[in-house]
Image (cartoon, rainbow, N blue to C red):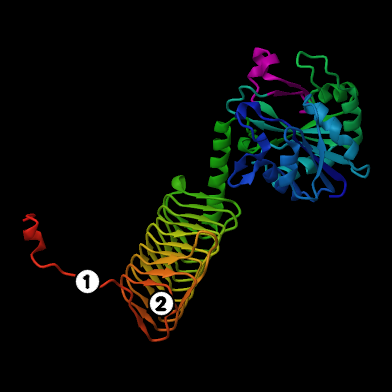
Amino acid sequence: MKELSVIILAAGKGVRMKSNLPKVLHRVCGKEMINHVVDNVKGLSASQIIVVTGYKQDAVKAVLDEKVETVWQEKQLGTGHAVMQAMPLVSKDAKYVLVLYGDTPLVSTETLKGLIDYHRGSSCGMTVLTVEMDNPEGYGRVLRDSAGKITAIVEHKDACPDQRRIREINSGIYCFDRELLLEGIGSLKNDNAQGEYYLTDIVEFLRDKGIIIGGYRTDDAREVMGVNTKYQLSVVQKIMNRSNLIRLMEDGVIIDDPDSTYIESSVVIGADTRILPGTHIEGSTRIGPDNVIGPGVRIQNCTLGSGNEIEFSVLRDSDIGSGCRIGPYAHIRPGCSIEGGNRIGNFVEVKNSRLEEHSKVSHLSYVGDGDVGRGVNIGCGVVFVNYDGRQKHRTIVEDGAFVGCNVNLVAPVRVKKDAYIAAGSTITRDVEEYSLAIERGQQVEKKDWVKRKGLR
């Protein structure tokens, strides 16, 4: 839509958030609020998106797409003043300007498109996105004439009792004719107690000029919820998370308990995968069909094939094949590639390692900086001793090897194909194919020692 420019207001610190982080950088379901808004606006195919920054502008700019333009509002002197800063950047080819806030992450592309289409198809110079609320306490009320056109927006504190009974409120999202917005911005004054320029004052200016002000009503009050406190942040996150879960369930995912499940919007999950209670799935995770995940699982930025079973475990930045069993209480740390049919059991930690197909690390082991072949058995209590105090070294265990319980593999070391290592050994040299390696102290038995010591 080449005739549309978008201005997103994101300059405020958000004092009520009680945080050093700019308000719009607080995350909702894994993504900054400002980027939720930007991504929803991108669906409009506008010719330009301008974000007005202020508090910690460099931090805000750092998370934005490079195609998004920014302008700095050095002093936060109100919403009208913020738009003043952006107008010089607005393309002269733009016929319409959409203005919205960076702290409304739930507003949808469909609703914004509806607002713009309504405005374009009407004779209005300004159109306000409105919504009816059961409890409009604290919101500005929308006053309309008998023809349904907006005559005023009255803030709650200034509204008379009759006006306070009005349930239609101002969302703070507007579509303007660009030329009229330029005129209106030029008319704003800051002769109020706060010394600020209010964008809503444009309504009176346009009305006095005989310009029609329209209202486009959305049915979902949740879309226009702004975030000003940590509590409101939690409410918005809960709404968005539930929306993500509904979308996944409609696509064929089984979610046993949505109330205890958290899945970010960026996650992709295949049909007939079952998500059990207490599961968190985040980031760029991609999960195939027919898995069982949970209970008590956290997955970040991983890819999983199909037919896996994972319970009470943490997986980060790794690739899992198909038909694996992981957990309970396993930790898959970044940089792992675990191919199909592997068993990673309870209290096993794997880091920056590759495990080829059908190997087992069943319990109480650490596999760090390792390359494990096909069909390998890693016994209980095995440690890949990978760190010498200065740098990490790799351990290689080739196909078919058997590593007994309580073995230390001191890297760099290679256990070759089909070799066996006896329990309790500390291996510091390569083990040849088909060999048995044993490294133990000699067992000594002192007869009748207990009696001589008077212990029994």
Give the x, y percent position of residue 456.
Answer: 6, 56
Residue 316 versus residue 12: which sits nearer the camera? 316
Please say whether residue 415 is one of the residues in the magenta stretch: no
Q: Amino acid at mark 2?
A: Val
Q: Relative to 419, does residue 3 appear above or below in the rendering? A: above
| 427 sits to left or right of 334 | left
- Residue at the spot 39% in from the left edge and 82% down from the top edge: 419
* Mark 1 to mark 2 CA distance (whole Å): 29 Å
Residue 125 visible (yes or no) = no
Question: Where is mark 1, residue-wise?
Answer: 443
- Residue at the spot 42% in from the left edge and 73% down from the top edge: 428
- Residue at the spot 54% in from the left edge and 37% down from the top edge: 234
Residue 324 versus residue 96: which sits nearer the camera? 324
Which quadrant would residue 10 be assigned to in this image? top right
| 203 sits to left or right of 232 | right
Label 2, residues with CA under 10 Å away: few <14, some 14-19, many ≥20: many
Residue 137 visible (yes or no) = yes
Residue farthest bottom in this picture: 434
Question: Where is mark 2, residue-wise?
Answer: 376
Sequence-first tag of 1 and 2:
2
Question: Could you tell me which secondary element the residue under label 2 belongs to?
Answer: loop
Please say whether residue 151 is one of the residues in the magenta stretch: yes
Range of residues picked out in magenta: 140-167
Residue farthest right in this picture: 92
Q: Relative to 125, does residue 369 appear above or below in the rendering? A: below
Question: Could you tell me which secondary element the residue under label 1 belongs to?
Answer: loop
Give the x, y percent position of residue 134.
Answer: 58, 28
Give the x, y percent position of residue 133.
Answer: 61, 29
